[in-house]
Image (cartoon, grey):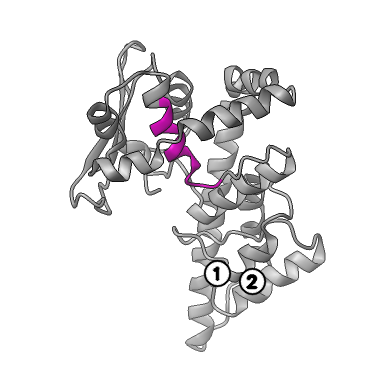
Amino acid sequence: MDIRGCDVSVPHCESEALIIALGVRKRTEAKRVQHVVLDPVRHLESYLLVKLLVCTTDPSGLLFPFTYWVFHSSIRAMDARFKLDLGLSGHSGRACFATEAIIVHKLSVPDAMREGRWLSESAFRMYVDIVGASAAQASFAARGLAPAADFCRVHVLLYLTADRLRNEQHGVRASKEALELHRAKAHTKGSGSEPVADSTAAATSLKGPAERMEQGAGRHAQSQHGRHGNRGQHGIAAPRVGGSKGKGRSKDLLRRLRQGS
C-alpha cells in the first residue's frame, strides 16, 4: 500500500473525480503505473476519506502507514469482536467492490473490470458473489444490525477526524525517526564509539503510534501475528495485536531492538 500524498490528484471542484496513481515506485502487475478513479457520486465515502487523508498527510508521506498484515489482522479482529460472522479479511473489499459494481451500480462486466483493474474476466467473476452479499444483508437485517451499519457508513467522518489523522501521521514519523536514530547509535557503538543515549528512549518512542492504529483490534490475531514477524513493510516496527501490557511489552520491544530490528 505504497500510496503517498503526492500520488493523489484532488480536484478543486467536489463534483469531479479524484484520481489515485498506483505503482509509481513499485510497479503493479500490469508493469506500469495505473490509476484509480473515485467518483464522488458512486463512491462518496471513499472519496471523502481519501481527500481527508491527503489533506492531513505530507506529500511524501504514506496515506496508509501500516502493513497489509496489520490491516488484515484488524479487519478479522473487528469481524470477531462485533460478532458480524462475515468471515471478513483484508481482501474482502475486493469482492465487495466487484459485487456492488454489478448489483448496485449496474455496471457492465467490462466497465467493472476497468474500474477495478482486473485483467481477465474469469478472475473478475471469482470476486462477484451476489448470493453471499444477499445472505449477509439478510443476516444483518435478522439480527437488527442494518441500522447500525447504515449509521456507521453515513457518519464515518465522525470516527476519522482530521485531528486524529494528523496525530497518527505525526506519531508514525516520530517512530520512524526514532528507529533510524537507534540504528545509527547501534552502528556507532559497534565501531567502538560511545552511543549518544540509551536505546530505551528509542523503544519508548517506537511503541505508541502503531499500537494506536491497532487499538481495538483485540487479541484475536495474536497467535497468528506472532508467526509472521514484527517488521512493517515500510521499516516501521508494528507491535503485536493484543498481547501483554505494560512492562512486559516494553521489554519485548526493547529486546527486539537490541537484536537488530
- In the image, residue 93 lies in the stretch drawn in magenta: yes
Give the left or right position of residue 249, taking residue 121 as reference. Answer: right
In this figure, which residue is indicated by the disc labeled 2?
Answer: 199
Give the left or right position of residue 101, taking residue 65 as reference. Answer: left
**Residue drawn at 58 percent across, 22 percent down:** 153
| Labelled disc at residue 69 | none
Amino acid at pointer 1 = His
The relative height of residue 157 versus residue 239 in the rendered view (above or below) is: above
**Residue drawn at 61 percent across, 33 percent down:** 164
Give the left or right position of residue 194, taking residue 247 as reference. Answer: left
**Residue drawn at 80 percent across, 60 percent down:** 245
Instruction: Where is residue 106? Give x, y as percent.
Output: 35, 18
Residue range (magenta): 89-100
Quadrant of the snapshot with the C terminus: bottom right
**Residue drawn at 27 percent across, 34 percent down:** 113
Label pair 2/1, CB-CB below 8 angstroms: yes
Amino acid at pointer 2 = Ser
The relative height of residue 24 versus residue 112 in the rendered view (above or below) is: below
Instruction: Where is residue 64? Give x, y as percent.
Output: 47, 43
- In the image, residue 81 lies in the stretch drawn in magenta: no
Instruction: Where is residue 65? Give x, y as percent.
Output: 49, 48
Dividing the picture into quarters, in which one does residue 222 lie?
A: bottom right
